[in-house]
């Protein structure tokens, strides 16, 4: 069954509400994460702030795109979907924007790692080195915009494609405004080859940059740097890797499930919708990991949580002290009044 108004995970209305809740929460956490990057990044890694912010921002774009702009209802094993978000009516552009945002999220990590490697590499800044870095940055920024264009070459005629997908999933005949990305397995295989190549480029560059950074850490040129600076650089880079691989690991089950469904003609709508929610939570997981892993960001959260409690405790303590002083004063005044009255009585008796 494609739609089921009685089921939370099968009802289009419920799906939209859940997407919006996840995305609003994601925006809130991302904004706080951006504040931490801009204001709380350690001075020793200030040069990484822009590229860390860029890396963080693409995660936000991905969550907003899925949760607000697309709000997808995907019908596996067919690569058909219906958009309930702001891009409803512009479904042809949805696959391109989705792939672009995923790709830029990965390639922004490459640029961040290169920035860290450049900060560790001591030596003369030659013209050739500047040209190479410019080409490296330009290609890693532009390539994610180019390779998703292949998807347009395989988008079929929608009327003919709908007849084909209805054979696989008959319930689609009752659903309006569905968009079919691709129909035949041969086209899917070609697209997967291109995407696998793009993923390979990201992974290969990350591995090479990591190897060069480890080499730079152990080089004789960097041994002159203070141990604390080197240790902080190591912690920062390690945190970046963990920060990225935690949310990436959450994306693996949805990807494997989608591939399994397509090549095995398997349909389970509730699981499909649930795993799309997992993908939309990618940014939340990544931002929370970033805040937890970076000490300065983690300390900021702890201070925000406990500062109010400390203020309330101090206020209560001051109030208690004031009350105690007032009570002591009242007791002292009572004693003084008692002595005065006693003195008057004694004077009266003497007379």
Image (cartoon, rainbow, N blue to C red):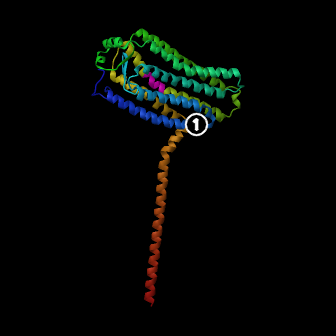
Place of residue 131 in the rendered image (x, y in percent of width and height, measured from the top left): 66, 21
Residue visible at 51% across and 44% down in the picture: 303
Q: Is residue 216 magenta?
A: no
Asked if residue 125 lies left or right of residue 281, the reply is right
Q: Is residue 248 magenta?
A: yes
- Which residue is at the front of the view, 296 or 138? 138
Kind of element beneath mark 1:
loop
Determine the image quadrant of residue 98. Answer: top left
Residue visible at 48% across and 62% down in the picture: 322
Count of labels shown?
1
Asked if residue 75 lies left or right of residue 214, the reply is left
Q: Farthest residue to the bottom: give it.
A: 351
Q: Residues within 10 Å of mark 1 (few under 14, many from 20)?
A: some
- Mark yes or no: residue 217 visible: no
Q: Which segment is the magenta one?
A: 247-253
Residue visible at 46% across and 56% down in the picture: 316
Q: Locate the C terminus by quadrant.
A: bottom left
Place of residue 181 in the rendered image (x, y in percent of width and height, measured from the top left): 40, 16
Asked if residue 6 lies left or right of residue 126, the reply is left
Asked if residue 150 lies left or right of residue 80, the reply is right
Place of residue 219 in the rendered image (x, y in percent of width and height, measured from the top left): 68, 25
Residue visible at 57% across and 21% down in the picture: 140
- Which residue is at the front of the view, 287 or 35? 35
- Mark yes or no: residue 167 visible: yes
Determine the image quadrant of residue 178. Answer: top left
Q: Locate the N terminus by quadrant.
A: top left
Q: Farthest residue to the front: give it.
A: 89
**Circle 1 is placed at which residue position?**
41
- Which residue is at the front of the view, 296 or 219? 296
Secondary structure mainly formed by the magenta segment: helix
Determine the image quadrant of residue 201. Answer: top right
């Amino acid at each position: 069954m494609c739609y089921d108004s009685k089921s939370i995970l099968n009802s289009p209305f419920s799906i939209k509400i859940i997407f919006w809740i996840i995305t609003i929460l994601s925006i809130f956490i991302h904004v706080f994460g951006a504040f931490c990057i801009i204001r709380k990044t350690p001075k020793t890694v200030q040069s990484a702030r822009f590229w860390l912010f860029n890396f963080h921002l693409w995660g936000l774009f991905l969550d907003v795109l899925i949760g607000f702009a697309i709000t997808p209802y995907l019908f596996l094993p067919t690569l058909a979907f219906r958009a309930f978000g702001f891009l409803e009516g512009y479904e042809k552009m949805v696959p391109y924007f989705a792939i672009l945002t995923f790709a830029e999220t990965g390639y922004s990590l490459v640029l961040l790692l290169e920035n860290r490697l450049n900060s560790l590499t001591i030596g003369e800044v030659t013209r050739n080195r500047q040209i190479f870095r410019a080409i490296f940055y330009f290609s890693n920024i532009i390539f994610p915009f180019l390779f998703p264009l292949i998807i347009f070459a395989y988008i079929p005629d929608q009327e003919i494609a709908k007849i084909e997908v209805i054979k696989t999933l008959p319930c689609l005949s009752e659903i309006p405004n569905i968009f079919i990305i691709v129909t035949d397995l041969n086209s899917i295989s070609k697209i997967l080859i291109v995407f696998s190549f793009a993923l390979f480029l990201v992974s290969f560059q990350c591995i090479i940059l990591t190897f060069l950074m480890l080499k730079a850490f152990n080089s004789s040129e960097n041994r002159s740097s203070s141990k604390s600076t080197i240790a902080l650089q190591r912690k920062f880079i390690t945190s970046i890797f963990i920060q990225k691989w935690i949310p990436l690991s959450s994306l693996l089950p949805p990807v494997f499930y989608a591939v399994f469904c397509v090549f095995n003609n398997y349909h389970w709508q509730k699981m499909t919708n649930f795993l799309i929610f997992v993908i939309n939570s990618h940014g939340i997981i990544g931002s929370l990991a970033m805040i937890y892993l970076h000490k300065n960001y983690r300390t900021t959260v702890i201070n925000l949580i406990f500062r109010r409690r400390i203020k309330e405790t101090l206020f209560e303590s001051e109030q208690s002290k004031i009350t105690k002083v007032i009570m002591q004063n009242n007791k002292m005044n009572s004693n003084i009044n008692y002595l005065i009255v006693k003195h008057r009585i004694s004077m009266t008796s003497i007379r």
